[in-house]
Amino acid sequence: MSLQLIADQKTGKERMPIVAIDGPAGAGKSTAARLLAYQLGFILIDTGALYRVLALTALQEDVALSDGPALASLARKLEISFGKLEFRESDPIPVLPVFCNGAEVTKDIRSPEIGMLASNVSKLPEVREALLQLQRDFGNTGGIVMEGRDIGTVIFPDAEIKFFLTASVESRAQRRWEELQAVGKSISLDQVIGETKARDEQDTNRTHAPLRKANDALLIDSTTIRLPDVVQQMAEIAREKINKK
């Protein structure tokens, strides 16, 4: 069953649909989005990577991470792009290459420290406004899978397909801890659980664009479901919805 072109609700022009995946940290959004985009043949846009790149660059250029206007100014100067999903070495999940001003920063932005700083940066309204149009520009032609915290509520409220992927704090922390252990990071599970709870608190209670489920998003709890099965479920739902259009 092939995916069909649909009419954009605002322009009336035909384009491929937009798939929005939201949810808390550690729910498996990034992995699910990569696998789903690969299965559908869609372009993957990792919005979290935008904030991670900004946080990393701010550290490198000594820009205060609490200075909203300065960070927004920096964000507008960055040229951020994504490569094609590709399998590298023995990694079972396709890697999304991320570039900033022409240099690849894929590995540099994935540390827990940068993740927490990105969460801090993302709560600043000036920063979110600066990156809002960039995120929307990525979706102009459709045919994308975009994951983040406010894709279905703020960035693309009219996205044709919306998922809210979640899981218990303990299972999300366990997955993250195992990932860190696999790359040689020395950190306790209790510490990861604490960081996960702090991230949830921060993302859910921020004033600007807090994490929440869109009313028309399908809730999927991955606590007891393997991610490959979650992705298969998403792919079937996506194909069914698109072909009904």
Image (cartoon, helix red, strand yellow):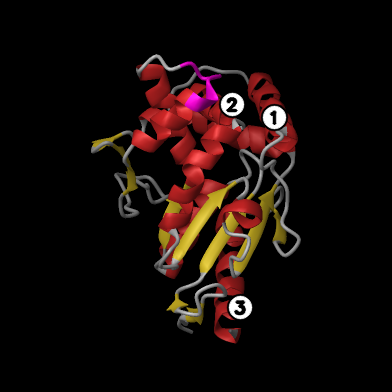
Q: Secondary structure at mark 1?
A: helix
Q: Secondary structure at mark 2?
A: helix
Q: Which residue position holds label 1? A: 202
- How far is mark 1 from mark 2, CA to CA? 8 Å
> Relative to the observer, which residue lies in front, 221 or 17?
17
**Residue shown at the point (47%, 82%) measured from the top left:** 4
- Dot 1 or dot 2: first in sequence order is 2
Q: Amino acid at mark 2?
A: Asn
* Magenta range: 64-69
Residue 113 image point, x, y percent = 51, 21
- How far is mark 3 from mark 1, CA to CA? 33 Å
Q: Determine which of the numbered discs, if any, sits on residue 6 in the image.
A: none
Image check: 146 left or right of 157?
A: left
Q: Determine which of the numbered discs, if any, sits on residue 241 in the image.
A: 3
Residue 213 drawn above or below residue 170: below
> Relative to the observer, which residue lies in front, 193 or 122?
122
- How far is mark 3 from mark 2, CA to CA? 36 Å
